[in-house]
Image (cartoon, rainbow, N blue to C red):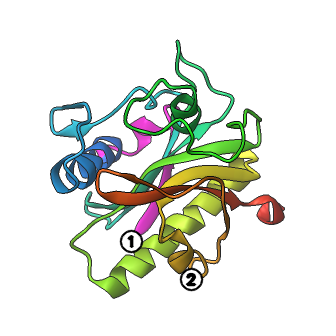
Amino acid sequence: MRATTLSFANLHNHGELFANVLRARRDSFIIRRNWDLPETMGMEYDQYDTPASRWLAVDDGTGRVLAGVRLTPSTHRCGIYSYMIRDAQHGLLDTIPTDLLYDTAPVAPQIWEVTRGFVAADLPAAQRQRVRLQLVLQMLRTSREEGIAKMIALLPSNWNRWAGRCKLEMAAAGRPMVMGGIEYQAVWIDFSTQLH
C-alpha cells in the first residue's frame, strides 16, 4: 500500500493513478451514492479539479485506488468559482445549503479545502482503518509541504467517531444538514501544531 500526492506538476510520473482516482470517485459518488455529477470515460470530475488542486491517493500498488481526497487552496479562483464550501455559501451550488458555515468562508493562504474524500466501500473494516490512517498521514505530509495550517471540509456528521482514531484535531465549522439522505457537517481540521 502506498500514498501519493498528485499535482499537475507530477501527474506524468504516476501513470494511470490520476485517472484511477477519478474512476474511484465515480464509483464512490455516482455509482454507490447516486450523486448527479459530471462524468466522462468512466471518471467523475467537476469545476474544482484544476491545476491549483492536489489529489491524495492511497493505492494497493497494482493501480487500484483504495482512498482519496482533493485539496484546494482557499485563495484559488477560476472564473466565478473559488472552492466548493465558499461557493455554496455564496449561492453558486444549488445542492448545498448557503448556511452551511457558522462564519464567512475563509480566504487565506494557509487554509485549504478538503473535498471528494472516499474510502473504497468493499474493504474489510480493519483494512479500511489502515487505509484511512495512510490517507491522514499523507494529508499531514502534504500540509507540511504546502504550508497548510487548517483545512475545511464537508463530512458525514459522524466525523467525531473516527477523528480521534486518526489523531486529527477537528471541530465543527457549521450546522449538521441532510443532503442526499446523509447528514453532513462542515468541520475544521487543524494541522497548525504539526507543521514543524
Q: What element carries label 2?
A: loop
Residue type, label 2: Arg
Q: Earlier in the sequence, mark 2 or mark 1?
A: 1
Magenta stretch contains residue 25: no
**Residue drawn at x 54%, y 17% as measured from the top left:** 78
Count neighbours of disc 1 (C-alpha within 10 A) and say few if under 14, some if 14 to 19, many if 20 or more.
Answer: few
State which mark lies toward you, 2 or 1: 2
Q: In the figure, residue 167 lies in which quadrant?
A: bottom right
Q: In this view, does 64 lie to the left or right of 155?
A: left
Relative to 154, does residue 59 appear above or below in the rendering? below
Q: Name the residue under label 1.
A: 1
- Looking at the image, is 15 positioned above or below residue 175? above
Q: Where's the N terminus, which quadrant?
A: bottom left
Q: Name the residue under label 2.
A: 165
Which is more toward the observer, 175 or 136? 175
Residue lying at 52% horizontally and 77% vertically, measured from the top left? 162
Q: Give the range drawn in magenta.
A: 1-16
Is residue 52 in view from this perspective?
no
Residue 154 seen by the camera: yes
Dot 2 crowding, Cα within 10 Å, few <14, some 14–19, many 20+: few
